[in-house]
Image (cartoon, grey):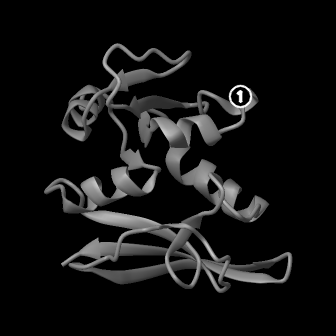
Amino acid sequence: MDRKNGIARDGDMPWHLPGDLKFFAKLTSGEGGNVVIMGRKTWDTIPERYRPLPRRKNIVISRQQGLQVEGAECATSLDMALEMASSCAGSVYVIGGAQIYALSLAHPNCGSVYVTEIDHDFECQVFFPTLTGYARTEILGEQKEKDLVYRFTRWTKQ
């Protein structure tokens, strides 16, 4: 997210930071058996050649009953998606968008949040929810790329 918690503009992320994408892939792929949960709009923003995200179980949440997307399972609620993820051995990561983030942050099973904090204002139209009840507990690294400074952080529920 940017300085103002911005995460999207014109239906997509307004930045392209290969170092951030590499960190995301390493974190969410892990040792295998991990799950990524996302809304349908987030699924649609992933270029087709990268869908489904490899080495992870992909679950897409949509209000549309009976939605089918190639390479992913579909759920109609966060609780349904979490139930589908419960059979996996790894970690569960919610990767967007804003509505799914808000539901996840309020969910009792959400204990921590990984955030890439970009030191720039991209004049976004969509924002990450305020991390009320969470505190930054780790800075996992910092990078500079394309004249942008950003850091990988972990926030833990208090």
Say which amino acid is labelled 1: Glu
Residue at far left of view: 108
Quadrant of residue 8 in the image? bottom right
Give the answer, above or below, for where 94 lies relative to 86.
Answer: below
- Left or right: where does residue 125 sit relative to residue 38? right
Foreground residue, 54 or 38? 38
Q: Position of residue 158 (x, y in %)?
A: 18, 78
Q: Which image quadrant: the N terminus? A: bottom right
Quadrant of residue 85 in the image? top left
Q: Position of residue 131 (x, y in %)?
A: 32, 76
Give the answer, above or below, for where 16 lies relative to 64.
Answer: below
Give the answer, above or below, for where 102 lies relative to 66.
Answer: below
Quadrant of residue 3 in the image? bottom right
Instruction: Write the residue at 30% across / 60% down.
Output: 102
Instruction: Write the residue at 40% across / 48% down.
Output: 93
Residue holding disc 1: 48
Foreground residue, 89 or 118? 118
Foreground residue, 144 or 38? 38
Give the answer, above or below, for where 84 lies relative to 148.
Answer: above
Secondary structure of the residue carrying tag 1 is: helix
Q: Position of residue 153 (x, y in %)?
A: 49, 76
